[in-house]
Amino acid sequence: MLIADESVNRNLIMAMRDSGYDIYSITEQMRSATDIQIANFSLNPSRIIITEDKDFGEIVYHKNLKVAGIILLRYLPPDYFIIKTKLLNYIAAHLNESIGKFIVISAKLTRIRSLPY
């Protein structure tokens, strides 16, 4: 399962659902949840957080808060369709191996790092 943070474009959520993915939308079901609440929610059962919010890097790498995994989307509005394609291709090929990872997807590259724990 995936968690879409409030920052994630609604059209991306719909595209993932249309592709058959189970997406838990924070906007729809936990509006105004804090990043810490979302991080804790991601742990049991394990759910990858998809976000456009760089603060998740801060809470993972500087505050040592545990999460199941994160996909951080970094793009400008003109790159939306590139990001949509890259995100759908990434989760189709690598979703199962994304637990324990911090993934950054931008229009030009995809970076994958292990979480620090």
Image (tube, rainbow, N blue to C red):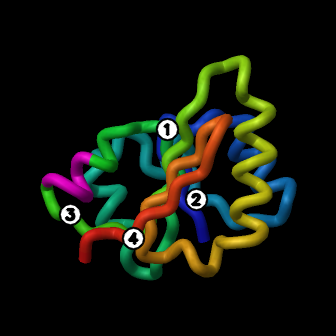
Q: Which residues are magenta?
A: 58-62
- Which quadrant of the figure contains the N terminus? bottom right
Q: Amino acid at mark 2?
A: Tyr
In the rendered image, which residue does mark 3 sit on?
65
In the rendered image, which residue does mark 2 sit on?
24
Q: What residue is drawn where x is 25% and y is 77%?
A: 117
Q: What residue is drawn where x is 63% and y is 34%?
A: 9
Disc on the earlier residue, 2 or 4: 2
**Few, some or many C-alpha atoms within 10 Å of disc 2 (few <14, some 14-19, many ≥20)?**
some
Cα gap from disc 3 to disc 1, whole angstroms:
18 Å
- Are the two marked residues, 2 and 4, in contact with CB atoms closer than 8 angstroms? no
Disc on the earlier residue, 4 or 3: 3
Picture coordinates of residue 22, whole percent (x, y) = 69, 66
Q: Amino acid at mark 4?
A: Ser
Residue 52 counted in the magenta span = no
**Few, some or many C-alpha atoms within 10 Å of disc 3 (few <14, some 14-19, many ≥20)?**
some
In the rendered image, which residue does mark 1 sit on?
52
Disc on the earlier residue, 1 or 4: 1
Q: Dot 3 lies on which element?
A: loop
Disc number lying in front (1 or 2)? 1
- Residue 89 quadrant: bottom right
Cα gap from disc 4 to disc 3, whole angstroms:
14 Å
Disc on the earlier residue, 3 or 1: 1
Q: In this picture, is 106 found above or below 37?
A: above
**Few, some or many C-alpha atoms within 10 Å of disc 4 (few <14, some 14-19, many ≥20)?**
few
| Residue 114 circle label | 4
Cα gap from disc 1 to disc 4, whole angstroms:
19 Å
Q: Dot 2 lies on which element?
A: strand
Q: Amino acid at mark 3?
A: Leu
